[in-house]
Image (spheres, helix red, strand yellow):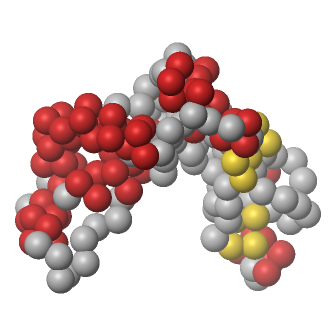
Amino acid sequence: MIRYLTTRVGPSPQEPEHDDLNFFILTGKPGAALAAVWRETGEELTADWIDAHPGSRPWAWWVYSAPMPRRCLVGTALLFPIRKPGDWEFSWRENWGVPAFVQGRPRGYVGLPRVESQATYLDRLGLLGAEECGALGVEAFAPEAVDPFLIDAEAMPPEERIMSEPASRGALSV
């Protein structure tokens, strides 16, 4: 359970924690059960995580405690539009704070979107302690490339391209 809350990687079937995690998943309400465990153990798990991984936070912190997603620095036109509060929140919470991007690479788009690093995010929000910050090198604050693309628009049949391109939703003109 602890590994799942910190890394989003569940135990293997041979590990004793496997049955505990299966219970939460099979109840149909894993979010509520995991949230309860996080409320009980989150502070301690986060402190242990920071000791081992300064400048970042465990996966469940993003799911249950993060106040907002990380900022997109390059590729903002590829973000899914937010029309009302909470739109796409499930996506960034499940993906370490990375906001929701379109999953089809638009024709002619080169490169990958970039988001602020976890260290930059934590520092911007005043969540990076002085000791934690002192343990980080300059590279911890470098923007992170993210690859949201499951499909490449140029490899798709023409009749399917329109659905994968953000321009068709008014987000990007290609």
Q: Is residue 109 visible?
A: yes
Q: Nearer the viewer, residue 157 or 61?
A: 61
Question: Where is residue 152 shown, x and y percent of the image?
Answer: 75, 73
What residue is shown at x 26% (from left), y 31% (from top)? 43
* Image-based side of 78 in relation to 58, left or right: right
Q: Is residue 83 visible?
A: no
Q: Is residue 121 above or below residue 63?
A: above
What residue is shown at x 36% (from left), y 59% (from top)? 8
Is the N terminus in the top left, top right, bottom left or bottom right quadrant? bottom left
- Determine the image quadrant of residue 49: top left
Q: Nearer the viewer, residue 41 or 169?
A: 41
Looking at the rendered structure, the number of numbered marks drawn on it comes to: 0
* Image-based side of 113 in relation to 45, left or right: right
Question: Where is residue 172 shown, x and y percent of the image?
Answer: 81, 46
What residue is shown at x 80% (from left), y 62% (from top)? 106
- Determine the image quadrant of residue 171: top right
